[in-house]
Amino acid sequence: MCFNFVMVVAFLLGGLLLNCPAYATTAKEYNVSGLAYGEEGQFPQAIAAFTQAIVMDPNFEKAYNNRGVVYYKQGDITHAIFDFDEALAINPDYVDAYCNRGLAYGKQGESAQAIIDFTKAIQTDVMFTKAYVNRAVAYFDAQDYDNAWADVHRAEQLGNIISPGFLDALKKESGRDK
């Protein structure tokens, strides 16, 4: 009886020390835990959980992508891009990773690279509306207003509602209405 109690305490403490939930035993469970921590803004715990998922399954592209999102939210764009790269090395058709990496490049002011990633996401899934919206913003940042308008129209055709603030800025900078 005492042995079981000691084992349980050691297991729980191990999980706390690693900032990971003690109940997670698989890569998928660690990934789910990381998502929960990320939603709560507990970024170090989220990163630890995603890292454990990756240790358990080095080909778990979603864990790389999710950890990249947390790094992005923390402003660590270098690590975010690394993780998106890893996810894409595992799954070259992973549209979320292309879109997320495009956002990271955009955050760094690299509009051309962002446009490439959003375009790859669209080529992979022509119905992925987030990529059209994000590429419109990247085109706007690159002062390519014609292509920004084209993506706005395509996103709207697919049912996406474009931010009125962005539309106003695009109208002003391009000198025209939709």
Image (tube, helix red, strand yellow):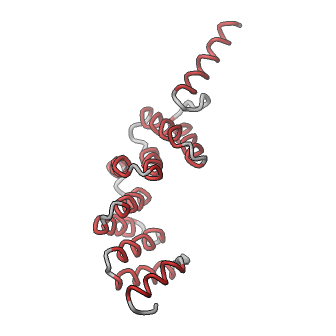
Would you place residue 106 above or below residue 178 in this image? above
Q: Looking at the image, is 3 positioned above or below residue 67? A: above
Q: How many marks?
A: 0
15 left or right of 4?
left
Q: Is residue 111 left or right of residue 61?
A: left
The residue at the point 48 percent across, 82 percent down is 167
**Residue 102 in picture, x, y percent from top left:** 37, 62
Which residue occupies the foreground of this view, 87 or 16? 16
Image coordinates for residue 157, horizontal then vertical, percent:
51, 82
Residue 77 locus on image (x, y percent): 37, 52
Please, which residue is most extreme toward the top here? Answer: 2
Figure check: 91 above or below 155? above
Quadrant of the snapshot with the N terminus: top right
Where is residue 142 drawn, in percent x and y? 31, 75
For image coordinates 64% across by 11% down, the residue present is 6
Q: Nearer the viewer, residue 72 or 134?
A: 72
Instruction: Look at 64% across and 17% down and name the residue there.
Output: 8
> With 45 as the anchor, is 51 left or right in this view?
left
Q: Residue furthest bottom?
A: 176
What residue is rendered at 39% in x and 49% in y? 76
